[in-house]
C-alpha cells in the first residue's frame, strides 16, 4: 500500500510524532499513538525502538523526489 492510497489520514499528533522520530528526539510514550502509526505502516519496532518506515519518510518529504523503490520511480 502506498501513502497515496492510504484510506485514513494522519492526525496532526501523528505527524508531529513522525517529525520527532525523524529528528532523533524521543517519541511520546503514548502507546495508542505508537500503535496507530505502526498499524498505518509508518513505524516499526527495531530493537525496542520505533523507527520510521520508508512510507513515513515519504510522508515527511512529500514535495521531494521519492525514495521508495517501485513506488516512487
Image (cartoon, helix red, strand yellow):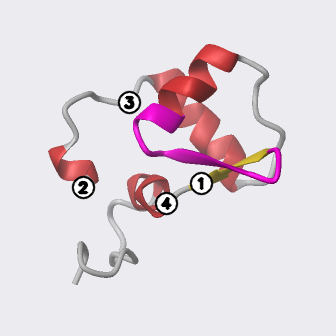
Neighbor class of circle 4 (other Cα within 10 Å; few <14, some 14-19, many 20+) is some
Is label 4 or label 1 in front?
A: 1
Farthest residue, direction front: 47
Mark 3 lies on residue: 10
Q: Residue at 43% across / 45% down in the picture?
A: 41
Label 2 vs 1, first from the N-terminus: 2
Q: Quadrant of residue 58?
A: bottom left
Give the distance between the C-alpha atoms of the residues marked 3 and 4, in whole angstroms.
13 Å
| Vertical order, 5 against 31 (above or below) | below
Q: Label 2, on which residue? A: 2
**Which segment did they paint magenta?**
38-48
Name the residue carrying label 1.
Answer: 52
Q: Mark 1 falls on what kind of element?
A: strand
Circle 4 sits on which residue?
Answer: 57
Please name which of the two marks, 3 or 2, marks the residue nearer to the observer.
2
Whether the magenta-drawn stretch holds residue 40 is answered as yes
Q: Report how far apart the C-alphas of labels 2 and 1 lie in the structure.
A: 15 Å
Q: Nearer the viewer, mark 3 or mark 1?
A: 1
Where does residue 59 sit, x and y in percent of width and height?
A: 40, 52
- Callout 3–callout 1 Cβ contact below 8 Å: no
Spatial CA distance of label 4 from label 1 is 7 Å
Q: Relative to residue 68, is residue 45 depicted above or below?
A: above
Q: Where in the figure is residue 13, as x and y percent of width and height?
A: 54, 22
Disc 4 is placed on an element classified as: helix
Instruction: Give the side of residue 5 with respect to residue 44, left or right.
Output: left
Amino acid at each position: 500500500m502506498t501513502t497515496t492510497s492510504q484510506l485514513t489520514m494522519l492526525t496532526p499528533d501523528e505527524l508531529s510524532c513522525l517529525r520527532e522520530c525523524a529528528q532523533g528526539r524521543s517519541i511520546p510514550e503514548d502507546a495508542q499513538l505508537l500503535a496507530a502509526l505502526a498499524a498505518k505502516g509508518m513505524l516499526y519496532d527495531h530493537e525496542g525502538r520505533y523507527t520510521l518506515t520508508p512510507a513515513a519518510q515519504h510522508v515527511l518529504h512529500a514535495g521531494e523526489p521519492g525514495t521508495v523503490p517501485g513506488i516512487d520511480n
